[in-house]
Image (spheres, rainbow, N blue to C red):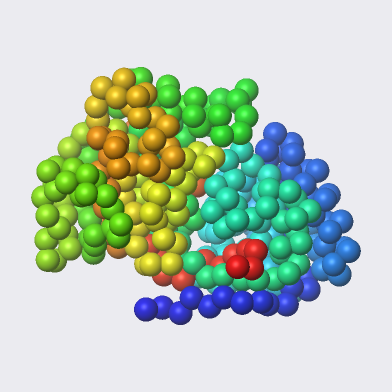
Amino acid sequence: MPDYPIGYEPIGTVALLTNPRSGYGSARHATERALSHFNKRGVESVAFTAMTAEDNGRLIRQALDDDDFDAIVVCGGDGMINSALQETADTGIPLGIIPAGSGNDTARHFRIPMDPGAAAEVIADGFVTTTDLGRVSDDNGQSKWFATLLGCATDAYASRRADSLTWAKGPNKFTLAIAREIIRPTTHTYRFELEGVRPIPFLSDAENARRIARDGEIPDDGRVVIERQVGMATFGNTRCFGGGRAVCPRADHRDGMLDFTIAELCNPLMYVRYFNDFGSGNHADVPFVTSYRCRRARVECPAMRTAAHGDGEPLMRVPFTVEAVEAAGRYIVPAP
């Protein structure tokens, strides 16, 4: 097992990156609140403005090269956190979060306060935890990191649609987008080659029975191949996306594994009937859900016309390999 160090670390100087357009402009106010709290706590902060993911990456690389900062702090949503992870993953530098986005699923998972002042206090306290991250790689050697979940099917199309719903705010944006997609779900055939498959602890008898009926028992070599049309197909390092929808309710960010949830293709009315149970993580009685836990997976779907989305951002087109990378992420979080 890898080492997952946790504990207090001195936070004297931080690089604070903000996209003022995040959260429909709320990030600007959140940044001002955070800077005020840092000043009161004696934390020196250098503020940077990043209007795009490219700006964010360039500024973080600059901050890392300077080697003057105890932590990188982002004020924004899951997309901005994702762009920061592309630079901070596997470096040992802790990432602090001032939530100011639409879904804020990364912050929710780590119990980071939504109030920017309280979130800044957490960063100043300096309790750091180590976690796994997800990594998706194409056949050309290009890789992207993600913190929460990676959507590969209708969930990817829904994330793309949510980006276009500029008039909708907060978690309602993704709810509307997924509702639109399940009315006319895509009917592509996917191939998933799962490796290192293990049983999910505490999975209900009903869920286990559905999995066995569809795909058989888990073989001794831990390799499972699934090839069929599916509705949603989500790999989870953490539990939720879309503003708190627990699609992978048993995912553990410190087990070196990804949970894999399939929402089987079915009548759209079935999705509507069980929509709240599915989103709340109560999958025991949801007949179209199949769940796995694996170390890595190969995903293929020649007909898919959008990229798989991780942390709500387009990351990689099929075919690709997705895997859990142990102890690759470090976050500043509330002390337990």
In the rendered image, is residue 66 in sight? no
Q: Position of residue 134 (x, y in %)?
A: 42, 58
Is 116 drawn above or below residue 304 in the view shown? Answer: below
Residue at (31% x, 50% y) in the render: 260
Task: Say which quarter of the image contains residue 122.
Answer: bottom right
- Side of 239 where 203 appears, left or right: left
Q: Quadrant of the C terminus?
A: bottom right
5, 328: nearer the viewer: 5
130, 113: nearer the viewer: 113
Task: Say which quarter of the image contains residue 191.
Answer: top left
In the rendered image, is residue 286 in sight? yes
Residue at (35% x, 29% y) in the render: 274
Task: Say which quarter of the image contains residue 283.
Answer: top left
Q: Quadrant of the N terminus?
A: bottom left
Q: Position of residue 182 (x, y in %)?
A: 36, 25
5, 21: nearer the viewer: 5
Is 73 drawn above or below residue 265 in the view shown? Answer: below
Q: Position of residue 68 (x, y in %)?
A: 74, 74
Residue at (75% x, 50% y) in the render: 116
Q: Position of residue 317 (x, y in %)?
A: 36, 43
- Side of 260 where 7 appears, left or right: right
Is 257 drawn above or below residue 274 in the view shown? Answer: below
Residue at (57% x, 58% y) in the render: 110
